[in-house]
Image: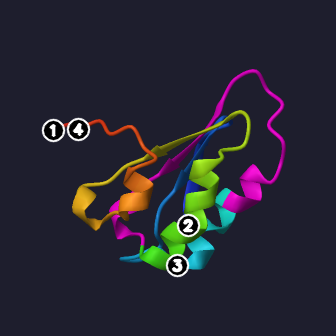
């Protein structure tokens, strides 16, 4: 299945290949957002297991979250907020769910 699995033509799922994110796990995300989104329908990027992202990878993601490209929406999934950088949390709208 590879490092990511695109489920829909307006959606890209990103998740770590192993127990933690590596730089190459985010490459598909950065490759996608380098293109101007021209559709009227938003393009969603879902970052699974954000709580598995070490600070170095999270810092690479931070600028993108601060100034998201037009037409792109980000959804981050995590089991624990305690493991996510506070600077990322401060730029997010948090929704808690129970399983």
Residue, x 31% and y 54% (percent of image)? 78
Q: Quadrant of residue 70?
A: top right
For label 3, the SS is: loop
Residue, x 71% and y 33% (percent of image)? 71
Q: CA distance from mark 1 to mark 3?
A: 28 Å
In the image, taking residue 52 as reference, residue 59 lies left or right, namely right
> From the viewer's perspective, is residue 17 above or below residue 41?
below
Discs 2/1, front: 1
Image spot of residue 57 (x, y percent): 52, 73
Visible residue check, residue 28? yes
Discs 1/4, front: 4
For label 1, the SS is: loop
Magenta stretch encompasses residue 41: yes
According to the image, label 4 marks what residue? 96
According to the image, label 3 marks what residue? 22
Query: Quarter holding the N terminus?
Result: bottom right
Q: Earlier in the sequence, mark 1 or mark 3?
A: 3
> From the viewer's perspective, is residue 9 above or below residue 61?
above
According to the image, label 1 marks what residue? 98
User: Magenta residues?
Assistant: 30-53
Q: Earlier in the sequence, mark 4 or mark 3?
A: 3
Q: Earlier in the sequence, mark 3 or mark 2?
A: 2
Q: CA distance from mark 4 to mark 3?
A: 26 Å
Visible residue check, residue 2? no
The label on residue 12 is none
The label on residue 3 is 2
Give the crowd class for mark 2: few <14, some 14-19, many >=20 residues within 10 Å: some
């Amino acid at each position: 299945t590879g490092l990511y699995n695109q489920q829909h033509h307006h959606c890209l799922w990103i998740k770590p290949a192993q127990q933690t994110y590596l730089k190459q796990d985010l490459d598909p995300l950065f490759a996608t957002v380098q293109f101007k989104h021209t559709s009227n329908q938003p393009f969603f990027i879902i970052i699974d297991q954000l709580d598995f992202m070490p600070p170095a990878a999270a810092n690479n993601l931070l600028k993108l979250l601060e100034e998201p490209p037009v037409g792109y929406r980000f959804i981050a999934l995590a089991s624990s907020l305690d493991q996510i950088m506070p600077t990322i949390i401060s730029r997010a709208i948090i929704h808690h769910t129970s399983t």
